[in-house]
Image (cartoon, helix red, strand yellow):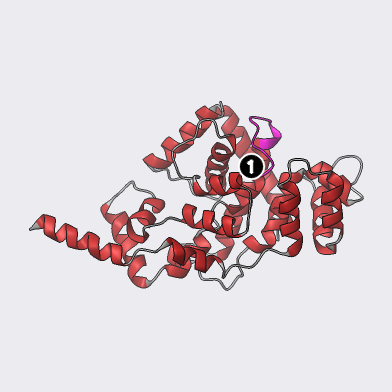
Amino acid sequence: MLDRIETLGEMNAQRHQIDVAELAESAQSLKPLPQTTSQIIAVLGDPLFEISDLIKVIALDPTLTARLLRVANSASYTTARPAACVGDAIVRLGTGTIMAMALSVSAKPDPDVDLSPIGLTTEEFWRHCVASVAAAEELNSRRLARFGPGFSAAALLHDIGKLILVQHMTPERVEQMAEFRANHPGHRVIDAERAVLGVDHAEAGAVVASNWKLPEDIVGAIRNHHSPSQWENHLWNGVVLANQIALENTGHTEYTFGDSEIVADAMLALAVEDATYQAVASASRDRFDNLIELFA
């Protein structure tokens, strides 16, 4: 009898799960990428691209040009000589930060978006995104691994799928997820998403990234930022660490077993010792204080 009840419960839950096709349709509701951003992605996707090609694209967008120059001359990047043109900004910031800045226009949710079904405000969501970029940039600056040019962009977008899932969070699904967490102490939120919704925000984020035609390495990093470590994929491991550092720097210090195991594996894969991790976390806080205004 008990087995029958559990089976009926599982069947009932499955009826309320989200189809991947629904995610793809919901992804269309997000802000489309500006033409400049699409062109930047296309240029950087060419392994033989020239800096001059990137300059031509950015120079035609005065708003992005102004933002990049403001960032390049900010406290986090400033040197004795100010960045006076787009070329100077590209050299100082690097192509990874350029892509993240361009994507931030579409990635930042409008203030009136209701994220309460997943326990967030739009400000909390965005602060975590920017804190992840700060951590990624700090990890990259220490040359701990070859993360690739998509690191900052992947860090910025790793939770973008939450903006998709929240569109499907009916009161019934919210209640089911709360019941799952109550009945499975120590499990992660993403475990509840998988059990109740049939998909998680990482997969939803990969759908968005694919819809925006982002490079496959970024799509993969978003899809796998809560998955067991891929030891040879530095970008994926870097995003795992950037996410965890951002969580800690924004006050989320609780670990589940699943989180701690994945973070520990990422640290081993990148040969990051605890002292280095703590140093990166500390330096990331200083970067965040500057970036949160510049990414506004």
Q: Amino acid at mark 1?
A: Ala
Q: Residue furthest bottom?
A: 112
Q: Is residue 144 magenta?
A: yes
- Count the marks: how many? 1
Give x and y (percent) for residue 155. 60, 47
Q: Which residue is mark 1?
A: 136
Front in this rendered view, residue 162 or 23: 23
Q: The residue tagged with tag 1: helix, strand or loop?
A: helix
Q: Does residue 131 appear anywhere in the picture?
A: no
Rendered residue at 72%/57% (across/down): 102
Residue 158 in the image, given as x and y percentages of width and height: 56, 51
Q: Is residue 184 shown left or right of residue 232?
A: left
Q: Quadrant of the N terminus?
A: bottom left
- Residue 198 painted magenta: no
Which residue is rendered at x = 75% and y = 57% of the image? 39
Q: Is residue 232 above or below residue 66?
A: above
Quarter residue 76 falls in: top right
Q: Which residues are magenta?
A: 140-150
Q: Quadrant of residue 59?
A: bottom right
Identified at 30% across, 57% down, the residue is 180
Expressed as whole percent of the image width and height from the top left, the position of residue 92 reads 82, 42
**Residue 204 located left or right of residue 76:** left
Dominant secondary structure of the residues highlighted in magenta in the image:
loop
Give the quadrant of the C terminus: bottom right
Q: Tell me if I can see residue 179 in this picture.
A: yes
